[in-house]
Image (cartoon, grey):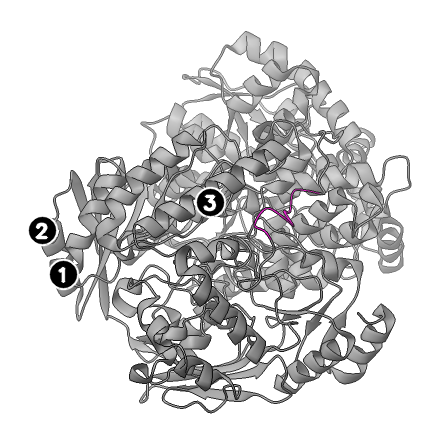
Amino acid sequence: MGNGNELEQALRHAVRGDVDFSVTGRALFTMDASNYRRVPRAVVAPRDAADVAAALAACRDHGVPVVARGAGTSIAGQATGTGVVLDFTRHMDRILDLDPQERTARVQPGVVLDTLRDAAAAHGLTFGPDPSTHSRCTLGGMIGNNSCGSHSVAWGTTADNVHDLSVIAGDGDIPRTLVHGSWDGAPAGLRPLVDAHLATLRTGFPDLPRRISGYALDALLPERGPDLPRFFCGSEGTLGVLTEATVRLVEAPRARALAVLGYVDESAAAEAAPGLLPHHPLTVEGMAADLVRDTGGLPKGGAWLFVETGGASPAEARAHATAIVRAADCVDAVVVDEPARQRALWRVREDASGTATRMPDGSEAWPGWEDCAVPPARLGPYLREFRALLTEHGLRGTPYGHFGDGCIHVRIDFDLLSEAGVGRFRRFSEDLADLVVAHGGSLSGEHGDGQARAELLPKMYGRELVGLFEQVKDLWDPAGLLNPDMLVRPAPLDTNLRFTPLPREPVDVAFGYPHDGGDFSAAVRRCVGVAKCRTPTAASGGGVMCPSFRATGEEEHSTRGRARLLHEMLAGEVVTDGWRSTEVRDALDLCLSCKGCRSDCPVGVDMATYKAEFLHQHYAGRRRPAAHYAMGRLPRWLRVVAATRSARLVNLLASVGPLAALAKRLGGIEPRRGLPRVAARTFRRWWRGRDAVVGVPGRTVVLWPDTFTDHLSPSVARAAVRVLEAAGLTVVLPPDGVCCGITYVSTGQLDQARAVQRRTLELMRPLLERLGEGTPLVVLEPSCAAALKTDLVELGGVGDPAAAQALAASVRTFAQTLEEYAPDWRPPRLDRPAVGQTHCHQHAVLGDAAERRLRAAAGLDGELAGGCCGLAGNFGFEKGHYEVSTACAEEQLLPSVRQAPEGAEVLADGFSCRTQLEQMAGVRGRHLAEVLAEGLEQ
């Protein structure tokens, strides 16, 4: 194997794209979405086919393996490697041509599936295969794995939808074009090898729709073409590197309906699925109740089939779905034809790949046997025997997946941390392979063999056919450098496990990580690589998460990328300086702490908490960035301003250009940011000076005067008092000195955060005890409400967990308070459109259902923008963050305001959101309380 410096020089000389030998670059690509981990030597992002050829030539010269990679969502380990990783998502991600007449599209391998589907939709077309990762998976990865998705009962696998391929073989320098009906492009010895084994190829492959395992050599039979593109699909990058593909498009139904059928359990659903296929549905998907966080909107049952139908009109699609319901022998059913409700129900199914990673008791579950397939008619009996096998091995897992095609996904609670657990993983794998083969099935029905199953392929195909696979591999890749250890001559399935280098004892940390048994390593392990955080826009299904990735497009700035770096920090092999790591610090620097991943990530990764933890550990005993002192300790400085009554002086000085510039430089604040004005009269001063309100009936509520509202936006709190009292509630304030600690937490000053929160609990306990259990704590600023709900508890309850839990349980938003404690009150009718943004912490922690209902009751019509405003507390004020902050705002918030109809109300309950609107768009956003209070006056 060549010298590392020589390889780097060769690649940098030959490749025009990006060549990355850095610690960060290598650490980001150690894993895919499987149980496996390999440390690459470098990552190359080629710009075109010439770059691919140049990189392959350099790697051949130095004896270095190559693995091609798309979104890295593979579940069998085939997107990991020890040599050079080719990342196609950065540059080779374009649609080169789309021909609606021919119904074809010519694409580069890094094109995201949803990008192609969106382009095709303009012509009434779509690409049929659609894995649940459709918002981030790439066409190259789909071709490499022969991906399928939920619509395969209608449109087949990726191999069924490929027209021709351009590939560079392991020994080649120029792309070869593979087309149906021709041997052109194949290595010289391939046709004679096929001709010599025709009988074996005609009898050695099981006949089922989801047979993905091994090489599809039967596609090369004379009676089938030969079909080189079909044969190449599913070869997992072991034969050649794809540089371009022409794929077929299908006509998309003009309207769709979704019939959700309820059954007693998944076996009953599985046995019913084949009987629905004669009705020509678009999908027959199945899942059990174990995987559903919220069964609202689903019919009765312990398991469900999701059966989608199409039609030329909504009425036709619904009639088709209704006919299927009549034909189905189910417990209960619901038919949905409204698109938003269909999307919500489909998210329940698509998120199963993430929710399945945790058992109901919170313990971890892993892939490895993620997608076996059997003939659909055998699925019911297979599932019963599969359940029995789990019990026999003392394991748990909940099947779900493509019941109409006999393909089952399941995550199993393997113990992959101990030697005994890994041994059981192997024994179960061998027994399950025997069971699948006994039912005439395929070890892989969608995600490929990789390392996870390839070792067991002789059970399915026999030694002779597996020997043919090896000969084919040698013809295409004589040096054996393309994705070695995968599919052919694989590494053992119980080696290279991602968990091996992690510490076995819990790491000493500040947060409690209650959902992970107090173990920071377990918290980091939550990220299994499904990459929902890589969705390019909020509209594409990612929710708020991950705004920094959407701004930069860099893996380093995705939730998954940061989790990978933290994993490698704990492993200590690539990232070697632990909590002092500058690589992890720099990746976390652009994390906005929006908490979007806490709710939007299917496995509940909480990067905002991990970032706070890292900053706390990283800067322990060291000087911090100036912004941590200036903005992280903002409550302290504002209390000084209030105590000295110097707000007017502070505002005057801030308005003098040179003085403001000096203050920003000293405070680590972005020069292009305006400094918010401090209120001359705080809310608390107003409260103390107001006339006492006498005779206000009803329940007492405690209004929390957070730092931002008290010192910077007191009008919000005054308006809230007006509305709450109009609703018949008695408002009281907590003692001076309370604080949620959010600014300390977001900058990782956790010792100070605990001190502040401990003081808060001491001050609040007597008040809440006096007012009685159930007294709501009304918090107007969403970030402060979220901190009281989560950080206060997860920082160990700051010495009094019971009190912290009680305080957290009392927290209510403004709208929740009105809904729960003044249910008969009706807001003033405002009857005008509304735009603006739901605060990310509200989305992630608190929910906004009550706010939606309150706006509707007030006649404020319209959906608020999702995503993140980009200011995110201190983030957007810190020097070096301006461009990302602006890009986040431009994704949804600012366009929604610019496109707002005349007279629209601009709503933003968060101080950060209002500040971003004012500084970026010159628009004054208002808290919902301010709008309702004004309505009361009118």
Residue 117 position (above or below residue 708): below
Mark 3 Cα within 10 Å, few/some/many (few <14, many 20+)? some
Q: Position of residue 619 (x, y in %)?
A: 85, 40
Circle 2: residue type: Ala
- Is 515 magenta? The answer is no
Quadrant of the rendered image containing residue 417 = top right
Circle 1: residue type: His
Circle 3: residue type: Glu
Q: Earlier in the sequence, mark 3 or mark 1?
A: 1
Q: Position of residue 231 (x, y in %)?
A: 42, 76
Residue hosting label 3: 430
Mark 3–mark 1 Cα distance, whole angstroms, equals: 37 Å
Magenta stretch: helix, strand or loop mostly: loop
Q: Nearer the viewer, mark 3 or mark 1?
A: 3
Residue 649 position (above or below residue 837): above
Describe residue 38's horizontal placement relative to residue 425 as left or right: right
Mark 2 Cα within 10 Å, few/some/many (few <14, many 20+)? few
Magenta segment range? 492-500
Residue hosting label 1: 279
Mark carried by residue 327: 2
Mark 1 Cα within 10 Å, few/some/many (few <14, many 20+)? few
Residue at image x 84%, y 69%?
A: 4
Q: Quadrant of the C terminus?
A: top left
Residue 892 position (above or below residue 641): below
Dot 1 falls on a residue whose secondary structure is helix
Dot 3 falls on a residue whose secondary structure is helix
Dot 2 falls on a residue whose secondary structure is helix
